């Protein structure tokens, strides 16, 4: 059974959802990088929901500097580091970031500004173009994404961490999806009437069933912004980044996150799901008793995505203007299409093909 920390009670705030990246000045970041890592070069700020992310270009290659909020629990930082170290040891060919140790071997170092101490870590910078930039989705790409997630699932076998059950806002099984405040305040009016009965149905059956499934370690955030595409082959994945949303949960949830994002690109949801599952099955195994819940797992992710993106826009958080103009409307359209999908027909077609995979 999947156990997670309870969601915040009362009126949700930005701090409750940890959507507060720090703002260490570039000069202070450069000083820490030079002092502790021997790295110098131009900086390019990158998007980050909780961490301050910076691409650092050096003569020896590019690196990713991640600065955690001073209020971030250190056990969560250790969780990400331990996971990446585990993956590097189990499968060094996985296209995921690698931890870069400081000169003294430490995997985190302090950086100081205005009487605050920030935790800085450096990772390798993966080449490739994010899928949400290429906007090319095919059955072949979906299969390759599934294959990578299957490899990741196999590599995570045996890995555990005390922080694996922490409260993660994007986790559809943490109770936040059932929150009346989210649906009342952060679903567009035209969607609220359609989504609230669906949420009640999910809360009554599918979500409890998914919480009772065996839990494994999952990346939890394989959406199109974190999937990197090879420059020479639009159907090949060359990287998976951002391990900040990792949790323990059913493997079905890992696939649902990826599929919810792929379906946003106006593709046939059944064909894309089948291709992704086939790729996953090449490297790992999805228990067939979880497949009947795939549609609802995707739908839950889509509803929560619209709610949390709307939350970020309403609170004018980092990147809010771009979210309001691009990502949020795309997610709303995808959710509208998914609400029109016959779940039984979807499940029947996917299951028929899945059983042929045995």
Image: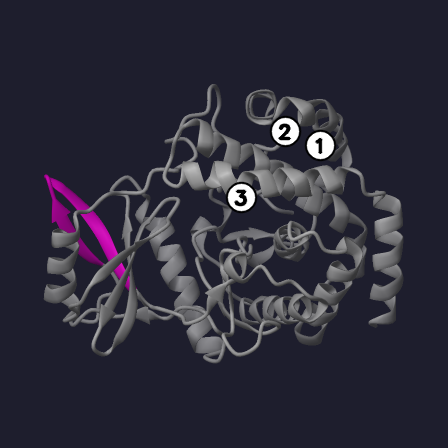
Q: Secondary structure at mark 2?
A: loop
Q: Secondary structure at mark 3?
A: helix
Instruction: Tell whether 5 sits left or right of 197.
Output: left
Mark toward the start of the polypeptide (3 vs 2): 2
User: In the rendered view, would you say 57 is above or below 72?
Assistant: below
Q: Is residue 285 visible?
A: no
- Residue 7 part of the magenta segment: no
Q: Are marks 1 and 2 in contact (CB under 8 Å)?
A: yes
| 10 Å crowding of disc 3: few (<14), some (14-19), many (20+) | some
Q: Which mark is residue 178?
A: 2
Instruction: Tell whether 263 sits left or right of 231.
Output: right
Residue 356 x/y as whole percent: 87, 70
**Magenta span main SS:** strand
Q: Which mark is residue 203?
A: 1
- For label 3, the residue is 327
Q: Is residue 73 visible?
A: yes
Toward the viewer: 339 or 146? Answer: 339
Q: Which mark is residue 30?
A: none
User: In the rendered view, would you say 318 is above or below 26?
Assistant: above
Mark toward the viewer: 3 or 1? 3
Q: Are marks 3 and 2 in contact (CB under 8 Å)?
A: no
Which residues are the magenta region?
Answer: 109-122
Residue 282 x/y as whole percent: 70, 75
Q: For marks 1 and 2, give the CA distance.
A: 7 Å
Q: At 43% across and 63% down in the image, what residue appears?
A: 83
Q: Secondary structure at mark 1?
A: helix
Q: At 24% across and 42% down in the image, what residue appears?
A: 70
Q: For marks 3 and 2, give the CA distance.
A: 23 Å
């Amino acid at each position: 059974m999947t156990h997670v920390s309870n969601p915040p009670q009362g009126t949700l705030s930005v701090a409750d959802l940890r959507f507060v990246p720090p703002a260490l000045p570039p000069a202070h970041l450069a000083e820490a990088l030079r002092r502790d890592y021997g790295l110098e070069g131009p900086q390019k700020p990158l998007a980050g929901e909780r961490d301050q992310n910076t691409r650092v270009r050096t003569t020896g290659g590019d690196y990713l500097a991640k600065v955690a909020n001073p209020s971030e629990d250190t056990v969560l930082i250790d969780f990400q580091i331990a996971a990446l170290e585990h993956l590097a040891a189990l499968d060094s060919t996985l296209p995921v970031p690698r931890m870069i140790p400081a000169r003294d071997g430490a995997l985190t170092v302090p950086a100081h500004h205005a009487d605050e101490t920030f935790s800085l870590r450096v990772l390798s910078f993966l080449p490739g173009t994010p899928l949400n930039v290429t906007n090319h989705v095919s059955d072949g790409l979906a299969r390759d994404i599934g294959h990578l997630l299957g490899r990741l699932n196999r590599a995570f076998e045996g890995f555990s961490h005390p922080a694996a059950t922490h409260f993660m806002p994007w986790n559809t099984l943490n109770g936040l999806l059932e929150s009346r405040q989210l649906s009342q305040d952060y679903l567009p009016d035209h969607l609220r009437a359609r989504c609230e009965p669906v949420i009640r149905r999910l809360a009554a059956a599918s979500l409890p069933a998914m919480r009772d499934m065996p839990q494994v370690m999952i990346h939890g955030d394989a959406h199109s912004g974190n999937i990197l595409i090879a420059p020479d082959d639009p159907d090949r994945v060359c990287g998976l980044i951002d391990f900040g949303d990792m949790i323990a949960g059913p493997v079905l949830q890992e696939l649902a996150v990826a599929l919810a994002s792929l379906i946003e690109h106006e593709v046939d949801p059944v064909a894309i799901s089948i291709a992704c599952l086939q790729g996953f099955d090449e490297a790992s195994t999805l228990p067939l008793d979880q497949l009947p819940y795939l549609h609802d797992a995707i739908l839950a992710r889509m509803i929560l995505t619209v709610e949390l993106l709307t939350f970020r826009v309403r609170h004018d958080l980092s990147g809010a203007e771009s979210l309001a103009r691009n990502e949020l409307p795309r997610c709303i359209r995808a959710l509208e299409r998914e609400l029109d999908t016959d779940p039984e027909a979807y499940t029947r077609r996917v299951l028929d093909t899945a059983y042929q995979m045995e």
